[in-house]
Image (cartoon, rainbow, N blue to C red):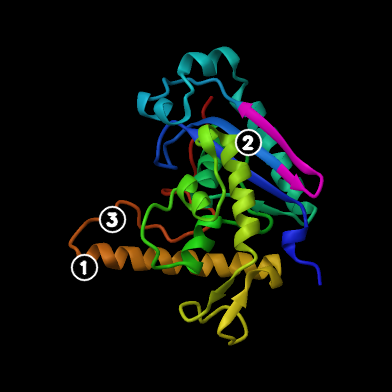
């Protein structure tokens, strides 16, 4: 029986101007197609209408001057990105995104700012961050992509925090995690009552639904932990893989 691990996957990663997906602006995006023949990336660098904060440049290495000298128009790039996303889903592929609610929400907000239709999740998403937490809930340490990848023997090296390197690492991580089985004790609404769920053996639709439930459970558990410590939580969303826009429709940017 064929598994989703044996089929092509499209990986997505972005580098942005900040950590809040509702206000961050896109700096770079990579869409990488992973097949049995290898890795085929498409990369975009975007011109900026506001300065890239120094702390963001420290992470991804791209300055405002570089983006404006070498980058392309955001609107044109978004049209191409969404076209490739929708084509991948139409062809039955999974779209792999590490911490999907961040990248997809940033892309959605940028589409709205440019006066383009909002992003639609038209097919399955694989989020290695959600799967790693479901598989190894109590492991201590960082859950940043570079650290989780290293835990599974995937080294990013000096290319870490570049959109293409991170997209490829997320794809490799999804493939490795897919060989494992997750205990269902905390996810009673998923599966057929069995104790373990072998990730490689489920359909992409079922895997997508499992991650929706797992993400909600993980977020609620984290918020309960913070409440017990008397600490505030800035982000209370449990939506995966794309967050709703607060306050209704966004105004388009001329």
Check the image and report above or below for 139 versus 192.
Answer: above
Q: Which circle's residue, 3 or 2, is located before the other in the chain?
A: 2
Q: CA distance from mark 3 to mark 1?
A: 12 Å
Tell whether 179 sits left or right of 147. Answer: right
Could you say which is closer to the camera, residue 201 or residue 157? 157
Please give the name of the residue rendered at 60% of the width and 42% of the height, measured from the top-left corner: 167
Residue highlighted by disc 1: 228
Seen as rendered, the residue at the extreme left is 230
Q: Say which mark, if any, is on residue 30.
A: 2
Which class describes the residues within 10 Å of circle 3: few (<14), some (14-19), or many (20+)? few
Residue highlighted by disc 3: 233
Give the extent of the magenta segment.
Answer: 33-44
Q: CA distance from mark 3 to mark 2?
A: 31 Å
Could you say which is closer to the camera, residue 50 or residue 204? 204
Looking at the rendered structure, the secondary structure element under dot 2 is strand
Closer to the eye: label 3 or 2? 2
Could you say which is closer to the camera, residue 19 or residue 23? 19
Q: CA distance from mark 2 to mark 1?
A: 39 Å
For residue 34: magenta? yes
Please give the name of the residue rendered at 46% of the width and 18% of the height, measured from the top-left corner: 64
């Amino acid at each position: 029986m064929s598994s989703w691990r044996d089929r092509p996957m499209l990986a997505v990663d972005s580098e942005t101007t900040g950590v809040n997906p509702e206000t961050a602006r896109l700096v770079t995006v990579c869409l990488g197609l992973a097949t049995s023949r290898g890795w085929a990336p498409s990369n975009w660098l975007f011109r900026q209408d506001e300065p890239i904060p120094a702390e963001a440049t420290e992470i991804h290495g791209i300055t405002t001057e570089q983006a404006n000298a070498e980058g392309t128009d955001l609107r044109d790039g978004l049209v191409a990105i969404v076209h490739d996303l929708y084509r991948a889903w139409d062809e039955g592929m999974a779209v792999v995104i590490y911490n999907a609610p961040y990248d997809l929400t940033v892309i959605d907000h940028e589409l709205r700012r440019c006066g383009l239709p909002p992003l639609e999740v038209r097919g399955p998403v694989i989020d290695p961050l959600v799967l790693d937490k479901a598989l190894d809930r109590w492991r201590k340490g960082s859950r940043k992509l570079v650290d989780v990848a290293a835990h599974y023997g995937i080294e990013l090296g000096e290319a870490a925090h570049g959109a293409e390197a991170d997209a490829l690492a997320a794809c490799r991580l999804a493939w490795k995690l897919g060989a494992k089985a997750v205990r269902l004790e905390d996810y009673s609404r998923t599966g057929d009552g069995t104790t373990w769920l072998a990730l490689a053996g489920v359909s992409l639709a079922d895997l997508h639904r499992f991650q929706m439930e797992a993400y909600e459970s993980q977020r609620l558990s984290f918020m309960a932990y913070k409440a017990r410590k008397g600490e505030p939580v800035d982000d209370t969303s449990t939506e995966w893989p794309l967050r709703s826009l607060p306050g209704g429709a966004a105004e388009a940017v001329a």
